[in-house]
Amino acid sequence: MAGAREEHRAGRLTDARSLRRRMRHRNGRLWLLVSFLVLRPTDLLLFKVAHSELILAGTIIASCWTTGLLAAVWLRVPWARYALIVGLPLCALVALLTTVVSEAQLKVRLALLAAAAAHLIATLILARSAAIKDLVSRAKD
C-alpha cells in the first residue's frame, strides 16, 4: 500500500514538473514572438521610407538573419540566442552610425533610430528573459 502511494506521489510530482516545464517553454515562445513583433514593424517602416539601396539591402539582410535566428531559438537551438544577443546590438550600432553619417531625409533618420531602438529592446528581451533561457536549455529536459 505504501509503495502504491509513493508511486502515485512520484507520478504527481513528475506531472507537476512537466507542466511547469511546458509553461516555461510557452512563456519563452511568447517572449520570442514579442521580440519578432518589436523588430518587424521598424523593418517595414524602413522599406516604406528609405530610397537608398544600401539601407534597403541592409534592412533585408538584417530581417532575414534575425528571423532565421529567432526561428532557431524557437526550435531550441542554444547558440542562436547568443548569436542574436551579439548581432542585434551590432545592427543597432550600424543603424545609429548610418543615421549620423547619412544625408538622408529626416523621416529616414527617424526610421533608422526606431530600428536601432527596436534592436536594443529585442536584445534586452533575449538576454534577460528567464523563460527564453529555459526554452533553449537542454539540461532541464
Image (cartoon, rainbow, N blue to C red):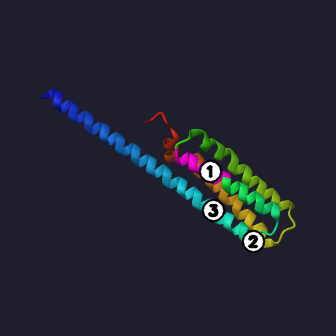
Let me know if residue 99 appears in the view. no
Q: Is residue 23 shown above or below 4?
A: below
Gap in Å between the C-alphas at discs 2 and 1? 24 Å
Left or right of residue 47, residue 26 in this image: left
Left or right of residue 68, residue 17 in this image: left
Asked if marks 3 and 2 touch (Cβ < 8 Å), the reply is no
Q: What secondary structure is marked by label 1? A: helix
Gap in Å between the C-alphas at discs 3 and 2? 15 Å
Q: Is residue 9 magenta?
A: no
- Observer-nearest of 101 and 41: 41
Q: Residue furthest left?
A: 1
- Which residue sits at x=26%, y=33%? 10
- The residue at which mark 1 appears reads as 68
Most common secondary structure along the magenta stretch: helix
Marked residue nearer the N-terminal end (3 or 2):
3
- Observer-nearest of 118 and 68: 68
- Residue 52's disc is none
**Residue type, mark 1 in image:** Gly
Marked residue nearer the N-terminal end (3 or 1):
3
Region of the chain picked out in magenta, as a range = 65-75
Q: Residues within 10 Å of mark 2 (few under 14, many from 20)?
A: some
- Residue 49's disc is 2
- Which residue sits at x=63%, y=66%? 41
- Which residue sits at x=30%, y=41%? 15
- The residue at which mark 3 appears reads as 40
Q: Position of residue 119 (x, y in %)?
A: 67, 56
Q: Position of residue 16 (x, y in %)?
A: 32, 42
Gap in Å between the C-alphas at discs 3 and 1? 13 Å
Asked if marks 2 and 1 touch (Cβ < 8 Å), the reply is no
**Residue type, mark 2 in image:** Val
